[in-house]
Amino acid sequence: MCEVLDEANSAILEAVALDATEDLLGTLVGIEKAEDDLVPFELNMFSILRREFRSFARSFLDSKDARDLIGRMADPANHTSLPDLKRQVKRAVLDAFHELAGKKLGEDFADAVGEEVSAVVDGMYEASRSATARRVGIPRDTFTVVDEQSLETLRRHNLFWIRGNYGRNVRDGIDRATAEALQQGLGRKALAEELKRQFAAQFALTDNHWITISSASLNRTRNVAQVRTYELAEVTHYEVIAVLDARTSEICQYMDGRVFSVESAVRVVNELEEAEDPEDVKQVMPWLRWDESRQAPFAVVGGRRTDLPRSGAESARANRSIEKVAPLPPYHGRCRTTTAVSVETVRR
Ligand SMILES: [Zn+2]
């Protein structure tokens, strides 16, 4: 129990260090999966992202454009004094840095790792497809055009999240690091060195984010592959299966054992294929949050909160309303929940 608490505490500290924003809430709720129990596919994607991002960040900070911008930040001519006499870099100079870093460490980075991470997504899809096919008794190599489309969608969506990594968390961290470095009252050259050092430290903090992205992308890939196999094998119902141990989130304890129709999941997966950007994906497959006082999850879709029935409400109607909002895991960041064919399945 103590270990779980330690882990939760360190995740909270990490999130606070990164300024716990909405994305990190997913990490906080889903303390289910730590770095040391990533499955091989996740570990593979995480290793690629971490290794490549670190090397990208390093060469970015050494590039002429970045060095020029850091030089401008260290130049007193580009500082403003706040009423309390603290110095700050002019917003326009900071924004120029963010714009450049966002492009290099967002778009360019995603382009550079795209092929390698897509290969991992493909591997996960095929492995899940083949294992599920065996379980439902259809040939293992019946890859259809529908699978190809799903896979194409998953690869494309995966790149959204990678591209978006230089988001608010990193930006806020850079702003804070800049303010701290300025307060040290260093000379121009030493200040430029210190800024570079602090920014490198901020980039190293993104590891946590890469774990969440790898875990969520591949959990989604596995579950979509399962749904496509159920559809092909004419399975009608499936069951949500959580890994039950000391780390299982409240959300997944709540979802575990629920039986949903394959039709609902197919509808969600089809809608997912229409999704053009991360916001669309969040609408189609929202992550759940846990309401402690209601003892039930809720989803926020399009700014509107939808509460799921309280624990213990097991009527068919309650189940239908859950199915409508959240038929398919992952339900939160670092979620381990998956699905299996339900005994309620009626073979046509
Ligand atoms: Zn979970």
Image (cartoon, helix red, strand yellow):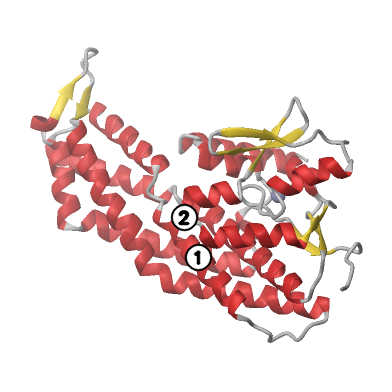
The spot of residue 287 in percent (x, y) is: 62, 45
Between 183 and 298, which is closer to the camera in this rendering? 298
Label 2, residues with CA under 10 Å away: few <14, some 14-19, many ≥20 = many
Q: Which residue is mark 2?
A: 161
Q: Is residue 86 above or below residue 178?
A: above
Mark linked to residue 267: none
In the figure, is residue 187 to the left or right of 322? Answer: left
Does the image show residue 62?
Answer: yes
Q: Which residue is mark 1?
A: 47
CB of residue at label 1: within 8 Å of ligand 1?
no
Q: Is residue 249 above or below residue 161?
A: above
CB-based contact (under 8 Å), mark 1 and mark 2: no
Res 92 → quadrant = top left
Which residue lies most toward the top here?
83
Taking the spot 73% from the left edge, 84% from the top edge, the residue there is 140
Name the amino acid type tagged 2.
Trp
Q: CA distance from mark 1 to mark 2?
A: 16 Å
Between 32 and 218, which is closer to the camera in this rendering? 218
In the figure, is residue 14 to the left or right of 262? Answer: left
Taking the spot 62% from the left edge, 32% from the top edge, the residue there is 305
Q: Is residue 54 above or below residue 226?
A: above
The spot of residue 229 in percent (x, y) is: 72, 73
Q: Judging from the image, what secondary structure is the residue with disc 1 in?
A: helix
The spot of residue 217 in percent (x, y) is: 57, 60
The spot of residue 346 in percent (x, y) is: 89, 68
Label 1, residues with CA under 10 Å away: few <14, some 14-19, many ≥20 = some
Task: Tell me which numbered mark, 1 or 2, is placed earlier along the sequence.
Answer: 1
In the figure, is residue 40 to the left or right of 108? Answer: right
Name the amino acid type tagged 1.
Ser
